[in-house]
Image (spheres, rainbow, N blue to C red):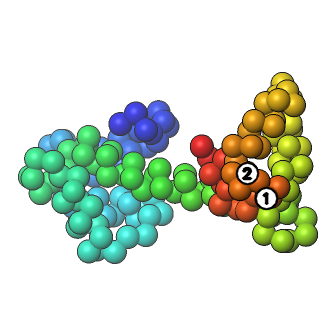
Amino acid sequence: MDTLDEEQLSALKKAFDSFDTDSKGFITPETVGVILRMMGVKISEKNLQQVIAETDEDGSGELEFEEFVELAAKFLIEEDEEALKAELKEAFRIYDKGGDGYITTDVLREILRELDNRLTEDDLDGIIEEVDEDGSGTLDFDEFMEMMSG
Protein backbone atom coordinates (compact mmCIF):
# COMPACT_ATOMS: atom_id res chain seq x y z
CA MET A 1 0.00 0.00 0.00
CA ASP A 2 3.01 2.29 0.18
CA THR A 3 2.74 3.16 -3.52
CA LEU A 4 -0.12 5.58 -2.86
CA ASP A 5 0.18 8.85 -0.99
CA GLU A 6 -1.83 9.76 2.11
CA GLU A 7 -4.32 11.84 0.13
CA GLN A 8 -5.07 8.96 -2.25
CA LEU A 9 -5.40 6.48 0.62
CA SER A 10 -7.74 8.84 2.45
CA ALA A 11 -9.94 9.26 -0.63
CA LEU A 12 -10.06 5.49 -1.13
CA LYS A 13 -10.95 4.93 2.53
CA LYS A 14 -13.80 7.45 2.29
CA ALA A 15 -15.12 5.83 -0.88
CA PHE A 16 -14.82 2.35 0.62
CA ASP A 17 -16.53 3.36 3.87
CA SER A 18 -19.34 5.18 2.11
CA PHE A 19 -20.16 2.03 0.12
CA ASP A 20 -19.61 -0.33 3.05
CA THR A 21 -22.81 0.99 4.61
CA ASP A 22 -23.22 -1.92 7.01
CA SER A 23 -19.58 -1.67 8.16
CA LYS A 24 -18.96 -5.29 7.23
CA GLY A 25 -15.38 -4.55 6.20
CA PHE A 26 -15.84 -5.49 2.55
CA ILE A 27 -17.51 -4.33 -0.65
CA THR A 28 -18.89 -6.30 -3.58
CA PRO A 29 -17.31 -6.49 -7.03
CA GLU A 30 -20.21 -4.44 -8.43
CA THR A 31 -19.44 -1.69 -5.94
CA VAL A 32 -15.78 -1.72 -6.94
CA GLY A 33 -16.85 -1.04 -10.53
CA VAL A 34 -19.01 1.88 -9.41
CA ILE A 35 -16.18 3.40 -7.34
CA LEU A 36 -13.63 3.02 -10.15
CA ARG A 37 -16.00 4.65 -12.64
CA MET A 38 -16.59 7.50 -10.19
CA MET A 39 -12.81 7.96 -10.09
CA GLY A 40 -12.80 8.29 -13.87
CA VAL A 41 -11.37 4.84 -14.59
CA LYS A 42 -12.74 3.33 -17.78
CA ILE A 43 -12.82 -0.46 -17.54
CA SER A 44 -14.94 -3.12 -19.19
CA GLU A 45 -16.95 -5.52 -17.05
CA LYS A 46 -14.79 -8.42 -18.26
CA ASN A 47 -11.54 -6.65 -17.33
CA LEU A 48 -13.00 -5.59 -14.00
CA GLN A 49 -13.90 -9.19 -13.13
CA GLN A 50 -10.41 -10.32 -14.13
CA VAL A 51 -8.71 -7.68 -11.98
CA ILE A 52 -10.99 -8.45 -9.04
CA ALA A 53 -10.21 -12.17 -9.33
CA GLU A 54 -6.48 -11.37 -9.26
CA THR A 55 -6.89 -9.09 -6.26
CA ASP A 56 -9.38 -11.10 -4.17
CA GLU A 57 -6.65 -12.98 -2.31
CA ASP A 58 -8.92 -14.87 0.04
CA GLY A 59 -11.32 -15.84 -2.75
CA SER A 60 -14.32 -14.54 -0.82
CA GLY A 61 -15.86 -12.80 -3.82
CA GLU A 62 -15.77 -9.60 -1.81
CA LEU A 63 -12.99 -7.09 -1.42
CA GLU A 64 -11.68 -6.05 1.96
CA PHE A 65 -10.15 -2.57 2.18
CA GLU A 66 -6.56 -3.76 1.64
CA GLU A 67 -7.60 -5.69 -1.46
CA PHE A 68 -9.57 -2.71 -2.72
CA VAL A 69 -6.55 -0.42 -2.26
CA GLU A 70 -4.32 -2.87 -4.12
CA LEU A 71 -6.80 -2.96 -7.00
CA ALA A 72 -7.32 0.81 -7.10
CA ALA A 73 -3.57 1.44 -6.92
CA LYS A 74 -3.12 -0.36 -10.24
CA PHE A 75 -5.33 2.22 -11.92
CA LEU A 76 -4.12 5.28 -10.02
CA ILE A 77 -0.45 4.50 -10.62
CA GLU A 78 -1.13 3.71 -14.27
CA GLU A 79 -2.79 7.12 -14.67
CA ASP A 80 0.22 8.79 -13.04
CA GLU A 81 2.50 7.07 -15.54
CA GLU A 82 0.31 8.19 -18.42
CA ALA A 83 0.37 11.77 -17.11
CA LEU A 84 4.17 11.63 -16.80
CA LYS A 85 4.49 10.34 -20.35
CA ALA A 86 2.24 13.14 -21.64
CA GLU A 87 4.28 15.77 -19.78
CA LEU A 88 7.55 14.37 -21.09
CA LYS A 89 6.15 14.22 -24.62
CA GLU A 90 5.21 17.89 -24.39
CA ALA A 91 8.65 18.83 -23.02
CA PHE A 92 10.32 16.82 -25.78
CA ARG A 93 8.18 18.54 -28.41
CA ILE A 94 9.21 21.96 -27.07
CA TYR A 95 12.91 21.10 -27.27
CA ASP A 96 12.57 19.37 -30.65
CA LYS A 97 12.28 22.75 -32.33
CA GLY A 98 12.60 21.40 -35.87
CA GLY A 99 10.02 18.67 -35.28
CA ASP A 100 12.57 16.10 -36.40
CA GLY A 101 11.66 13.49 -33.78
CA TYR A 102 14.92 13.86 -31.89
CA ILE A 103 16.89 16.32 -29.81
CA THR A 104 20.63 16.77 -29.95
CA THR A 105 22.90 15.96 -27.06
CA ASP A 106 23.72 19.69 -26.90
CA VAL A 107 20.05 20.42 -26.22
CA LEU A 108 20.01 17.61 -23.66
CA ARG A 109 23.04 19.18 -21.99
CA GLU A 110 21.07 22.46 -21.67
CA ILE A 111 18.05 20.64 -20.22
CA LEU A 112 20.20 18.83 -17.66
CA ARG A 113 21.91 22.08 -16.66
CA GLU A 114 18.48 23.68 -16.12
CA LEU A 115 17.37 20.73 -13.99
CA ASP A 116 20.50 20.71 -11.84
CA ASN A 117 23.00 23.55 -12.09
CA ARG A 118 25.47 21.67 -9.86
CA LEU A 119 26.27 19.17 -12.61
CA THR A 120 29.86 19.49 -13.80
CA GLU A 121 30.93 19.10 -17.43
CA ASP A 122 32.24 15.64 -16.52
CA ASP A 123 28.85 14.74 -15.01
CA LEU A 124 27.08 15.94 -18.14
CA ASP A 125 29.51 14.05 -20.40
CA GLY A 126 28.91 10.88 -18.39
CA ILE A 127 25.13 11.20 -18.54
CA ILE A 128 25.14 11.92 -22.25
CA GLU A 129 27.52 9.05 -22.95
CA GLU A 130 25.18 6.74 -21.07
CA VAL A 131 21.96 7.81 -22.80
CA ASP A 132 23.41 8.25 -26.29
CA GLU A 133 24.56 4.65 -26.50
CA ASP A 134 25.02 4.63 -30.25
CA GLY A 135 27.01 7.88 -30.22
CA SER A 136 24.69 9.48 -32.78
CA GLY A 137 24.60 12.81 -30.96
CA THR A 138 20.80 12.65 -30.82
CA LEU A 139 18.05 11.24 -28.60
CA ASP A 140 14.64 10.17 -29.83
CA PHE A 141 11.58 10.38 -27.59
CA ASP A 142 11.90 6.84 -26.23
CA GLU A 143 15.51 7.44 -25.15
CA PHE A 144 14.51 10.80 -23.65
CA MET A 145 11.58 9.22 -21.80
CA GLU A 146 13.72 6.39 -20.45
CA MET A 147 16.31 8.83 -19.17
CA MET A 148 13.80 11.21 -17.57
CA SER A 149 11.63 8.55 -15.95
CA GLY A 150 14.50 6.40 -14.75
Residue 75 percent location from the top left of the image: 42, 56
Pick the quarter of the image with the N terminus. Answer: top left
Kindly give the residue lying farthest to the front in the view shown: 135
Q: Which amino acid does label 1 sit on?
A: Ser
Residue 150 percent location from the top left of the image: 60, 43
Q: Quadrant of residue 43?
A: bottom left
Specify whether 87 is left or right of 57: right
Give me the residue at 14% from left, 43% from top.
24
Mark 2 and mark 1: Cα distance apart in space: 7 Å
Q: What residue type is labelled 2?
A: Asp
Specify whether 126 is left or right of 142: right
Can residue 60 be seen at all in this image of the molecule? yes
Camera-nearest residue between 26 and 5: 5
Give me the residue at 62% from left, 51% from top.
146
Q: Mark 2 points at which residue?
A: 132
Can residue 20 be seen at all in this image of the molecule? no
Instruction: Please tell me whether residue 87 is drawn above or below residue 17 in the rendered image.
Output: below
Residue 98 percent location from the top left of the image: 91, 69
Q: Quadrant of residue 12?
A: top left
Crowding at mark 1 (Cα within 10 Å: few <14, some 14-19, many 20+): few
Q: Name the residue under label 1.
A: 136
Check disc 2 and report its element: helix, strand or loop.
Answer: loop
Residues tagged 2 and 1 counted as in contact (Cβ below 8 A): yes
Instruction: Please tell me whether residue 43 is drawn above or below residue 76 in the rendered image.
Output: below
Camera-nearest residue between 85 and 69: 85
